[in-house]
Image: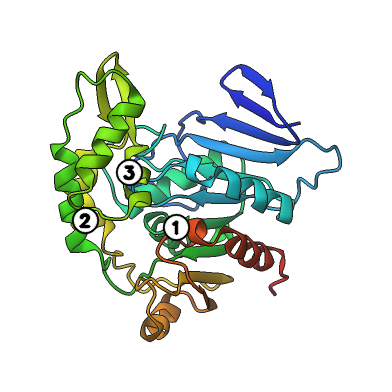
C-alpha cells in the first residue's frame, strides 16, 4: 500500500509509503563542525517521502534527496521518485525549494541559503548522509551543498547544469519574468480557465506548449475568483541574474565523492569543453548525455534517465 501522510491524515493508496511533511525548524545543533557565524538562516522545506512498507526494508542505506529546478516543485518528480525508489530500494525525499511549491517564501534566494535548507532538513530527519540529485537550479544547490558539506553526501547527481558558466537562458528569462508579472487573472471563474488564460498570454514569449503548461501549474487560487503565482515571483526575479543564473565562487573548495553530470544532447548547459573546469571542483565527475533530450532531461526521456540514475546509485564506488 502507498501511505500518504499530510500532517495527521493517512490515506492508503498502494505499495509505497509517501509522506508529505514539513519538518520543525530548529538550530543546527547536531552539526557541531559548522561555523555558526557563517550559516544562512534556513527555512523548513516541504517534502514528499517515498518508502516501502515492507518489514525487511534496509533502513541502514542512505536515502536520496531530490531538488527540482526554477519554477518547479516536488510534484514534478512524483513518478520519477517512485521509480527511483523501486529500482534502488532507497528512501527518496523530493523537496520544494524555498520560494517554490509548499515551502515558505523568503526574501533570501541564493545557493548558500538553499544548501542550508537541505542541511537543516537532514538534521531534522536525523539523516547523517544522503545521495543528492538536483535539476538545473536544484543541481546548483546540490553542488554547493556537496562542496561545503561533503561529510553529508554519499553521491552527487547533477541534471543539466554546470558550475562553469552562467545560465545560457539569461536573456530569455528576463522576458519570461516580465510576461509572468504582466498576467492578470482576477474574475476568471475557475482555476483551469485561469491557467488556460495565462498559458495564452505566455505564448507571446514562450513558444513550446509544454513549457507554458509547466509554468502555469504555479498558478493557484488565493480566494474565490482571485489567483496568484505560488512561487515567490518578485524574489526570484530580483535574485535571478546575480544569485541563480551564476554559480558562486566557492573559494577553492572541491568535492571528491562520486559525481555524475547528466545532460541532454539537445541542451547547451553542460558543454564538453567545460569538463576540465568542472573536474577542478568535482574531481570524480562523470558525464553522460541522453540522446534527444533537451534541458528537461528527466521529462523528455524518463526511462533512460531512471536507468542511468539508478545504475549510478546502485554501483559500488570505492
**Residue 54 position in % (x across, y down):** 83, 38
Q: Are marks 3 and 2 in contact (CB under 8 Å)?
A: no
Spatial distance from mark 3 to mark 1, Cα to Cα? 16 Å
Q: Mark 2 — residue? A: 173
Q: Quadrant of residue 45?
A: top left
Mark closer to the chain start, 1 or 2:
1
Q: Residue at x 34, y 40 (%)?
A: 41
Mark closer to the chain start, 3 or 2:
2
**Residue 301 position in % (x across, y down):** 54, 62
Q: Mark 3 — residue? A: 215
Q: For residue 152, say whether it is visible.
A: no
**Residue 302 position in % (x across, y down):** 57, 58
Mark closer to the chain start, 3 or 1:
1
Q: Mark 1 — residue? A: 135
Spatial distance from mark 1 to mark 2, Cα to Cα? 17 Å
- The numbered dot on residue 159 is none
Q: What is the secondary structure assignment of the residue under circle 3?
A: helix
Q: Residue at x 52, y 50 (%)?
A: 66
Amino acid at each position: 500500500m502507498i501511505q500518504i501522510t499530510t500532517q495527521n491524515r493517512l490515506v492508503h493508496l498502494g505499495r509505497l509509503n509517501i509522506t508529505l511533511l514539513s519538518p520543525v525548524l530548529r538550530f543546527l545543533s547536531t552539526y557541531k563542525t559548522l561555523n555558526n557565524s557563517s550559516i544562512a538562516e534556513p527555512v523548513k522545506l516541504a517534502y514528499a517521502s517515498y518508502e516501502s512498507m515492507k518489514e525487511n526494508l534496509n533502513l541502514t542505506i542512505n536515502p536520496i534527496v531530490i531538488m527540482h529546478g526554477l519554477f518547479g516543485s516536488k510534484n514534478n518528480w512524483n513518478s520519477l521518485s517512485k521509480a527511483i525508489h523501486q529500482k534502488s530500494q532507497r528512501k527518496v525525499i523530493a523537496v520544494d525549494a524555498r520560494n517554490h511549491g509548499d515551502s515558505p517564501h523568503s526574501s533570501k534566494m541564493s545557493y548558500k541559503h538553499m544548501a542550508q535548507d537541505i542541511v537543516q532538513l537532514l538534521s531534522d530527519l536525523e539523516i547523517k548522509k544522503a545521495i543528492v540529485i538536483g535539476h538545473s537550479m536544484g543541481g546548483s544547490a546540490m553542488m554547493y551543498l556537496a562542496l561545503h558539506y561533503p561529510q553529508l553526501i554519499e553521491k552527487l547527481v547533477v541534471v543539466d547544469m554546470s558550475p562553469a558558466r552562467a545560465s545560457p537562458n539569461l536573456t530569455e528569462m528576463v522576458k519570461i519574468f516580465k510576461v509572468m508579472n504582466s498576467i492578470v487573472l482576477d474574475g476568471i471563474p475557475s482555476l483551469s480557465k485561469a491557467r488556460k488564460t495565462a498559458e495564452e498570454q505566455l505564448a507571446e514569449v514562450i513558444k513550446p506548449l509544454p513549457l507554458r503548461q509547466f509554468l502555469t501549474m504555479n498558478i493557484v487560487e488565493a480566494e474565490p475568483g482571485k489567483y496568484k503565482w505560488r512561487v515567490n515571483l518578485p524574489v526570484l526575479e530580483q535574485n535571478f541574474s546575480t544569485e541563480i543564473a551564476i554559480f558562486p565562487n566557492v573559494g577553492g573548495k572541491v568535492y571528491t565523492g562520486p559525481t555524475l553530470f547528466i545532460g541532454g544532447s539537445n541542451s547547451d548547459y553542460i558543454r564538453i569543453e567545460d569538463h576540465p573546469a568542472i573536474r577542478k571542483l568535482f574531481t570524480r565527475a562523470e558525464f553522460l548525455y541522453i540522446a534527444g533530450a533537451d534541458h528537461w532531461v528527466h521529462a523528455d526521456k524518463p526511462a533512460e534517465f531512471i536507468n542511468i540514475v539508478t545504475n549510478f546509485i546502485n554501483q559500488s564506488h570505492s
